[in-house]
């Protein structure tokens, strides 16, 4: 580790943060202590706890939540009928469309005041939902357990490069004062101009954070800009860069690690699904299994065995006030059956391949990851950045940023490469643009396919 904890960091961890959580009615400190112990249990013991908590969640949902009172009765499922985790497949799925259609019915009768949240809407339409204090406490505890895997803790200075309007709109005086106390600084990922990147680098150098948290695309842009302009970031003491909310590509990991001279920890989750999984120092992507059950299903919704790629389905066990049971995330991943060298018994995701819209489909119906097209463009040195939009099986649009007009030979190389993968008759339109713009959430999406929807 590059630096030890200072006095203020220890004060925040031992006094300021506990007071903050107590004032908000959260139990995250107690939950963190529980998670620090349970991560070392074996998988059988973790599985038994999951089943016990699943039964309690289903029982509470059937008794107290109007939506689940109806659908679980119709499905003939109650807590007593769940004899193993495999019985989870008997429960109906929850989707974004169902949440939108049943928002009020998904709130538990007599629930304490719930906090309204919404996703960033990078898929085109934000999702509104609610969280209770127990759910928030569990997610906060899971985050801080994961940061401790990398030697950083509550009270260590942190910079967050984020683009959600939820965070940016909440920067009132009270929140700014709280963030200063907790030593967190927000940098808006919407605004990645050259001037703002200079300002971000200056702020990182001033604050000297021990951890940086953000989209991999945003942190890679900062790393690129620092390298291009000769500004150092490898001497500020960053221990780890936590990245989430987008697919982390190998070249992004390498750029971030080199620029900050730090580890890069991939994370998977979301406001809706929760803090699902996080990478440890040994490279294992551990599921927060005490609170979350992850299934992998095929397009028809049938559960897939370990080692097979499919849609990630999440059941969050701390959501009695607004249940997330068998929630279809739209993300594609693979569950692993290996044990991690770190010794934790938590199950692992072997791979998070991205959203279903990060995949493209050929004219003959073959589905492939967008990397099949990305690699064609990354081999072309004159193209600085790009975005691929598959409008249909017959049509693809490619936005490219290039200092000079794209040559006829380069355009031919792009078209030939795309057609070799998608089909000989596919129309490939190439459009030179000044910049690739982020989504409304601040994320960058390099592949967007409308052919699978």
Image: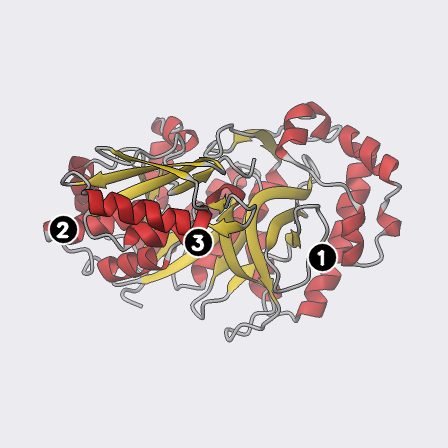
Q: Which of marks 1 and 3 is in front?
A: 1
Residue nearer the viewer, 313 or 142 = 313
Q: Where is residue 259 in the image (x, y as percent from the top left)?
A: 23, 58
Badge 2 or badge 3: first in the primary sequence: 3
Q: Is residue 185 above or below residue 290?
A: above
CA neighbours of label 2 inside 10 A, class few (<14), some (14 to 19), many (20+): few
Residue nearer the viewer, 343 or 415 = 415
The residue singled out by tag 1 in the image is 50
Q: Residue at point 62% right, 61% down?
A: 308
The residue singled out by tag 2 in the image is 228
The residue singled out by tag 3 in the image is 14
Q: Position of residue 299 (x, y in %)?
A: 66, 46
Badge 1 or badge 3: first in the primary sequence: 3
Quote the CA–CA distance across marks 1 and 3.
30 Å
Apparent side of residue 79 relative to residue 440 in the rendered image (left or right)? right
Q: Residue at point 71% right, 63% down?
A: 47
Q: Residue at point 58% right, 53% down?
A: 30
Q: In this view, does 92 lie above or below 172?
A: below
């Amino acid at each position: 580790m590059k630096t030890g904890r200072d006095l203020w960091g220890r004060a925040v961890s031992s006094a300021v943060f506990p007071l903050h959580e107590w004032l908000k009615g959260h139990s995250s400190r107690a939950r963190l202590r529980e998670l620090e112990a349970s991560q070392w249990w074996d998988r059988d013991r973790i599985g038994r706890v999951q089943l016990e908590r699943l039964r309690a969640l289903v029982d509470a949902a059937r008794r107290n939540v109007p939506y689940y009172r109806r659908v679980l009765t119709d499905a003939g499922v109650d807590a007593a009928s769940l004899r193993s985790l495999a019985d989870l497949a008997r429960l109906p799925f929850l989707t974004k469309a169902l949440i939108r259609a049943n928002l009020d019915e998904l709130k538990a009768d007599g629930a304490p005041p719930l906090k309204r949240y919404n996703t960033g809407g990078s898929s085109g339409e934000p999702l509104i939902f609610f969280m209770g204090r127990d759910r928030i406490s569990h997610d906060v505890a899971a985050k801080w357990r994961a940061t401790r895997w990398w030697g950083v803790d509550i009270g260590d200075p942190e910079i967050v490069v984020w683009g959600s309007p939820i965070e940016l709109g909440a920067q009132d005086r009270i929140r700014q004062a709280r963030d200063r106390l907790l030593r967190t600084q927000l940098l808006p990922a919407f605004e990645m101009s050259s001037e703002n990147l200079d300002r971000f680098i200056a702020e990182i150098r001033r604050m000297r954070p021990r951890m940086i948290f953000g989209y991999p695309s945003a942190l890679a842009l900062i790393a690129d800009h620092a390298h291009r302009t000769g500004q150092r970031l490898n001497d500020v003491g960053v221990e780890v860069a936590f990245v989430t909310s987008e697919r982390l590509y190998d070249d992004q990991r390498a750029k971030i690690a080199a620029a900050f001279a730090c580890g890069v920890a991939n994370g998977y989750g979301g406001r809706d699904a929760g803090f699902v999984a996080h990478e440890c120092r040994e490279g294992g992507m551990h599921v927060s299994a005490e609170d979350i059950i992850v299934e992998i299903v095929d397009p028809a919704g049938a559960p897939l065995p370990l080692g097979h790629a499919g849609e990630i389905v999440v059941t969050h066990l701390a959501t009695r006030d607004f249940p997330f049971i068998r929630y279809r995330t739209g993300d594609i991943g693979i569950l692993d059956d290996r044990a991690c060298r770190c010794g934790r018994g938590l199950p692992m995701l072997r791979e998070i391949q991205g959203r279903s819209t990060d995949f493209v489909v050929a004219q003959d119906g073959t589905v492939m990851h967008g990397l099949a097209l990305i690699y064609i463009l990354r081999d072309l040195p004159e193209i600085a950045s790009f975005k691929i939009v598959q409008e249909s099986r017959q049509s693809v649009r490619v936005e490219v940023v290039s200092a000079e007009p794209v040559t006829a030979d380069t355009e031919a190389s792009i078209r030939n490469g795309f057609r070799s993968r998608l089909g000989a008759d596919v129309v490939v339109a190439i459009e030179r643009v000044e910049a690739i713009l982020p989504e409304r959430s601040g994320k960058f999406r390099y592949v967007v396919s409308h052919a699978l929807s």
